[in-house]
């Protein structure tokens, strides 16, 4: 059994702890501090799963902790974007609304089916997280909107896969890397 107190879980807990800090920084308009804090949160998101696998410290608890950190970022970052980059949000409101809906709908569906948020950590979700994270830095550097738009398309596709996985699985499972894997689990092959 893997101890709950380990480096990967500490990184996920750090991301959870940074969520209210990000909210405060957004509320007070501390754009630069927000970006630095967000960078730390995103780096912790990249490292926690990689370290858990590398150190042999993967666990259901760690997957749930990681997903909670992800969910908090999905809630906090759009709120802070409204406060810190209102002109961008107004100009890209359709894309912004699609990204927020894509983040929330699979969570709601997972909660209603399994009584808890999903923790699939699919390959598509990882790719879209990298793209969305990068696009946030472009937004805060007053760059173009197209990286955010591309990231949103990839994110929507990843979240559609997550919804499909939820429809295929009969019980909650963490770390389901793809829809194909979900079909394998349903067939009882693994």
Image: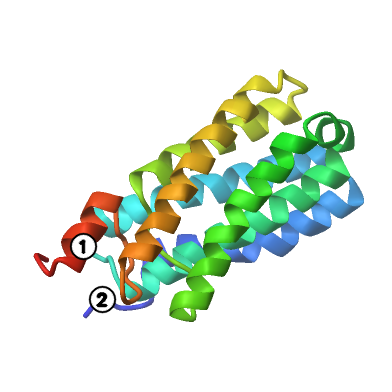
Which mark is drawn over residue 2? Answer: 2
Left/right placement of residue 92 relative to residue 90 reads left
| Quadrant in which the C terminus is drawn | bottom left
- Please say if 7 is above or below 141: below
Residue 188 image offset from top left, x and y in percent: 12, 70
- Contact between labelled residues 1 and 2, with CB atoms less than 8 Å apart: yes
Question: What secondary structure is marked by label 2?
Answer: loop
Q: At 32% across and 50% down in the image, what residue appears?
A: 50
Residue at the (39%, 42%) spot, across then down: 124
Packing grade of label 1 (10 A; few <14, some 14-19, many >=20) is few
The reply, left or right, for residue 162 in relation to residue 68 is left
Residue 187 vs residue 40: left or right? Answer: left
Near-viewer residue (10 or 124): 124
- Of helix, strand and loop, which one carries label 1? loop
Q: Which residue is mark 1?
A: 56
Residue at 59 percent of width and 59 percent of height: 105
Q: Earlier in the sequence, mark 2 or mark 1?
A: 2
Can you tell which quarter of the image residue 108 is in? bottom right
């Amino acid at each position: 059994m893997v101890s709950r107190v380990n480096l990967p879980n500490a990184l996920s807990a750090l991301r959870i702890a940074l969520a209210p800090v990000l909210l405060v920084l957004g509320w007070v308009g501390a754009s630069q501090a927000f970006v630095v804090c967000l960078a730390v949160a995103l780096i912790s998101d990249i490292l926690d799963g990689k370290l858990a696998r590398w150190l042999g410290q993967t666990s259901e608890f760690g997957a749930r902790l990681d997903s909670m950190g992800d969910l908090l970022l999905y809630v906090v970052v759009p709120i802070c974007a409204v406060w810190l980059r209102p002109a961008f949000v107004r100009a890209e409101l359709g894309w912004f609304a699609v990204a927020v809906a894509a983040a929330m709908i699979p969570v709601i569906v997972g909660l209603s089916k399994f009584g808890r948020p999903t923790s699939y950590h699919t390959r598509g979700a990882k790719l879209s997280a990298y793209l969305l994270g990068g696009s946030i830095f472009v937004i805060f550097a007053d760059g173009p909107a197209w990286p955010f738009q591309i990231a949103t398309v990839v994110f929507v596709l990843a979240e559609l896969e997550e919804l499909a996985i939820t429809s295929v699985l009969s019980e909650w499972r963490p770390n389901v890397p793809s829809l194909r894997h979900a079909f394998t689990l349903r067939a009882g092959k693994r």
